[in-house]
Image: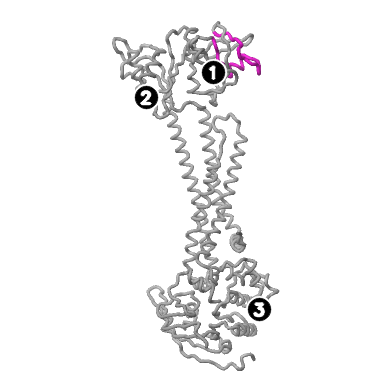
Amino acid sequence: MSQSIIRVNQLHKSYITGSNSLHVLKGLDIDIQQGEMVSIMGSSGSGKSTLLNILGILDNYDKGEFYLGDTLIKDLNEKKAAWYRNKMIGFVFQSFNLITFKNAMENVALPLYYQKVSRKKRNRIAMEYLEKVGLTEWAHHLPSELSGGQKQRVAIARALINNPKVILADEPTGALDTQTSYEVMELFHEINRSGITMIIVTHENDIAEKTERIIHLKDGVIEKEYKQNHSIRYA
Amino acid sequence: MIDIDKWQEIFHTLKQNKLRTTLTAFGIFWGIFMLVIMLGAGSGLENAVYANLGDFSRNSMFIWAQQTTMPYKGFPRNRQYYFEYSDKKALEQNIPEIEIVAPTVNGGGYRENTLLVHRHKKGNFNVLGKTPDENFIDPVILEYGRFLNEFDLKLNRKAVLLGYRAYEELFDKDENPINKYVRLNGIYFQVIGVYKSKHSGGWGENQNSQVWIPFTTAQQVYNYPNRVDHFSIVVKPEFEVKPVEGKVMAILAKRHKIHPDDKGAFGYNNVGEEFKKMNGLFLGIRGLIWIVGIGTLLAGIIGVSNIMLIILRERTVEFGIKRAIGASPRKIIGSVLSESIFLTTISGISGLMIGVFIIELVNNALPPESEMFRNPEIDFQLAITALIIIILSGMFAGIIPSRRAVSIKPIEAIRSEN
């Protein structure tokens, strides 16, 4: 019934720094089904960020295969990559990465700007998504006037606005306090229930535990991987 | 369609550091401003010089008789001879390049004045015997009456054409002089017209103080039965003046028994060559202006380019985020380029406008008959050229930074913050 949204076969990636070559990913095999909520854990240097960048088509890989849905993502030119990012993937970053001179609504609407949606229409849609994350009243505030949690929710609304298949979150709670972190995770679950695949990179155990499946990376390979029972998901 | 987001971005970036933006813009402003001012000044100088030349036929030469410098055919050197009216026909028939040969005789000798009297007013003026062709060589403006014509010459009419200064001295203000009589060398001449010189400065004043009578009449009045003081020769437009010069001298030498190599026997002035030199000079000045102007502008462009690179550094993260959420490289290039073009266009156009404004100011402050400087101007075509240069320079200034912007991988851009 379910099908793969992300399929990675024998993925290799090295960084070349000067004369040294750093082999970061050493033949990864990952299969993520549509609608799954997965967390990727690992200490720094384990390759989890690199993996996320490749999955987000922000970076190239050297060897192996990476299918996004049915499409092989390999050696895309920047224009194509930008198109897939825009259509398929939503990003949530640790440092929120909102555009400082645009208000919350305009930030949420930005991906639609690149799809050439008219300003009026994209702002209307942006308001709908801000409502979903509960920030309607803050729509016309600049990021500098928002709290960390609010900023992250704006970023999540921005990630959602173009109906992505996958949301990639890089340490989404890294800059938030525990209470806010849990609220953000709550929001992620809600999004996940609507059928969007969530991939969360984190090093916090309590965050990872709120997902269905945890993949542990170590030195560029999968160390362990397990699913967990989520009967007590919403404690 | 106006893209609000794009403009919001441009203004935001430029407002980030107002001093820096202003200083950068000043580079372009100054480049265009200097170019406009210098071109205006150049055109002022050029206009002044050409105004001095009037509508003088640019394809002409003068030749007058001097003393011979070589003995020839039994004649000694230092012999004074004169051209004759029949030389005109000989030149016209033997040199096909020639369009007009116009003789002039100086009444009473070279720059000798003659007394003219009209009722109780009188004055001394330089009287010249001219032909109707004169008006094709060095045209004048007729204030009253008509120019000399063929009948004046054929009938040896006692007709006189007054220069404007002569008219002013001999007649009351606004008095119509036509058909009135002035006494010239004791003989009454009928005034047929009054002319104003097209030349500015000393040349014009000199011409305005002359009095012209029919060439044939002058020969009689001053008792020069067969004498021409100088010929003005116009060459057909398709020919150069320089080669005709030699042919003219050869024919005149033969007719007046002058040694073929005796160049000193002739005085001549090649107006065509003078014009060429002048044109060359102004071409040089204009060339220099453009080199200096473009150089200054280039410094401004490099300034903009540099600042764009610095702005880029500050905006690396922003570009990274934008690309992560789907901005194509073209969008990024477009945003950097439009910023650069916007900055240069605004500063360039203000440079252009202020430059033109100052030139207009100078133009209005100048006395209208100024000899050194006249009508400095920037024509429409030049303004358009400057505008195109401005926009091109904006693009040029944006190219390197925009290339740099897309060469950064989005992930590196986002990471560079952490």
Q: Is residue A187 left or right of residue B372?
A: right
Examine the structure image and report whether residue B173 is included in the region drawn in magenta. yes
x%, y% of residue B306?
A: 50, 58
Task: Look at label 2 and name its amino acid.
Answer: Val
Residue range in magenta is B158-184
Mark 2 burial class by Cα count in 10 Å: few <14, some 14-19, many 20+:
many
Q: Which mark is residue A132?
A: 3
Badge 1 is on which residue? B147
What distance separates the C-alpha of mark 3 from that of mark 1? 94 Å
Mark 1 burial class by Cα count in 10 Å: few <14, some 14-19, many 20+:
many
What secondary structure is found at the residue carrying circle 3? helix
x%, y% of residue A208?
A: 56, 87
x%, y% of residue B288?
A: 46, 41
Task: Look at label 3 and name its amino acid.
Answer: Lys
What secondary structure is found at the residue carrying circle 2? helix
Task: Look at label 1 and name its amino acid.
Answer: Phe
What secondary structure is found at the residue carrying circle 1? loop
Badge 2 is on which residue? B244
The image quadrant where one finds the N terminus of chain B is: bottom right
The correct choice, above or below, for B11 with respect to A56 in the image is above
The correct choice, above or below, for B340 with respect to B414 in the image is above
Q: Chain of mark 2?
A: B
Q: Quadrant of residue B18?
A: bottom right
Q: Chain of mark 3?
A: A
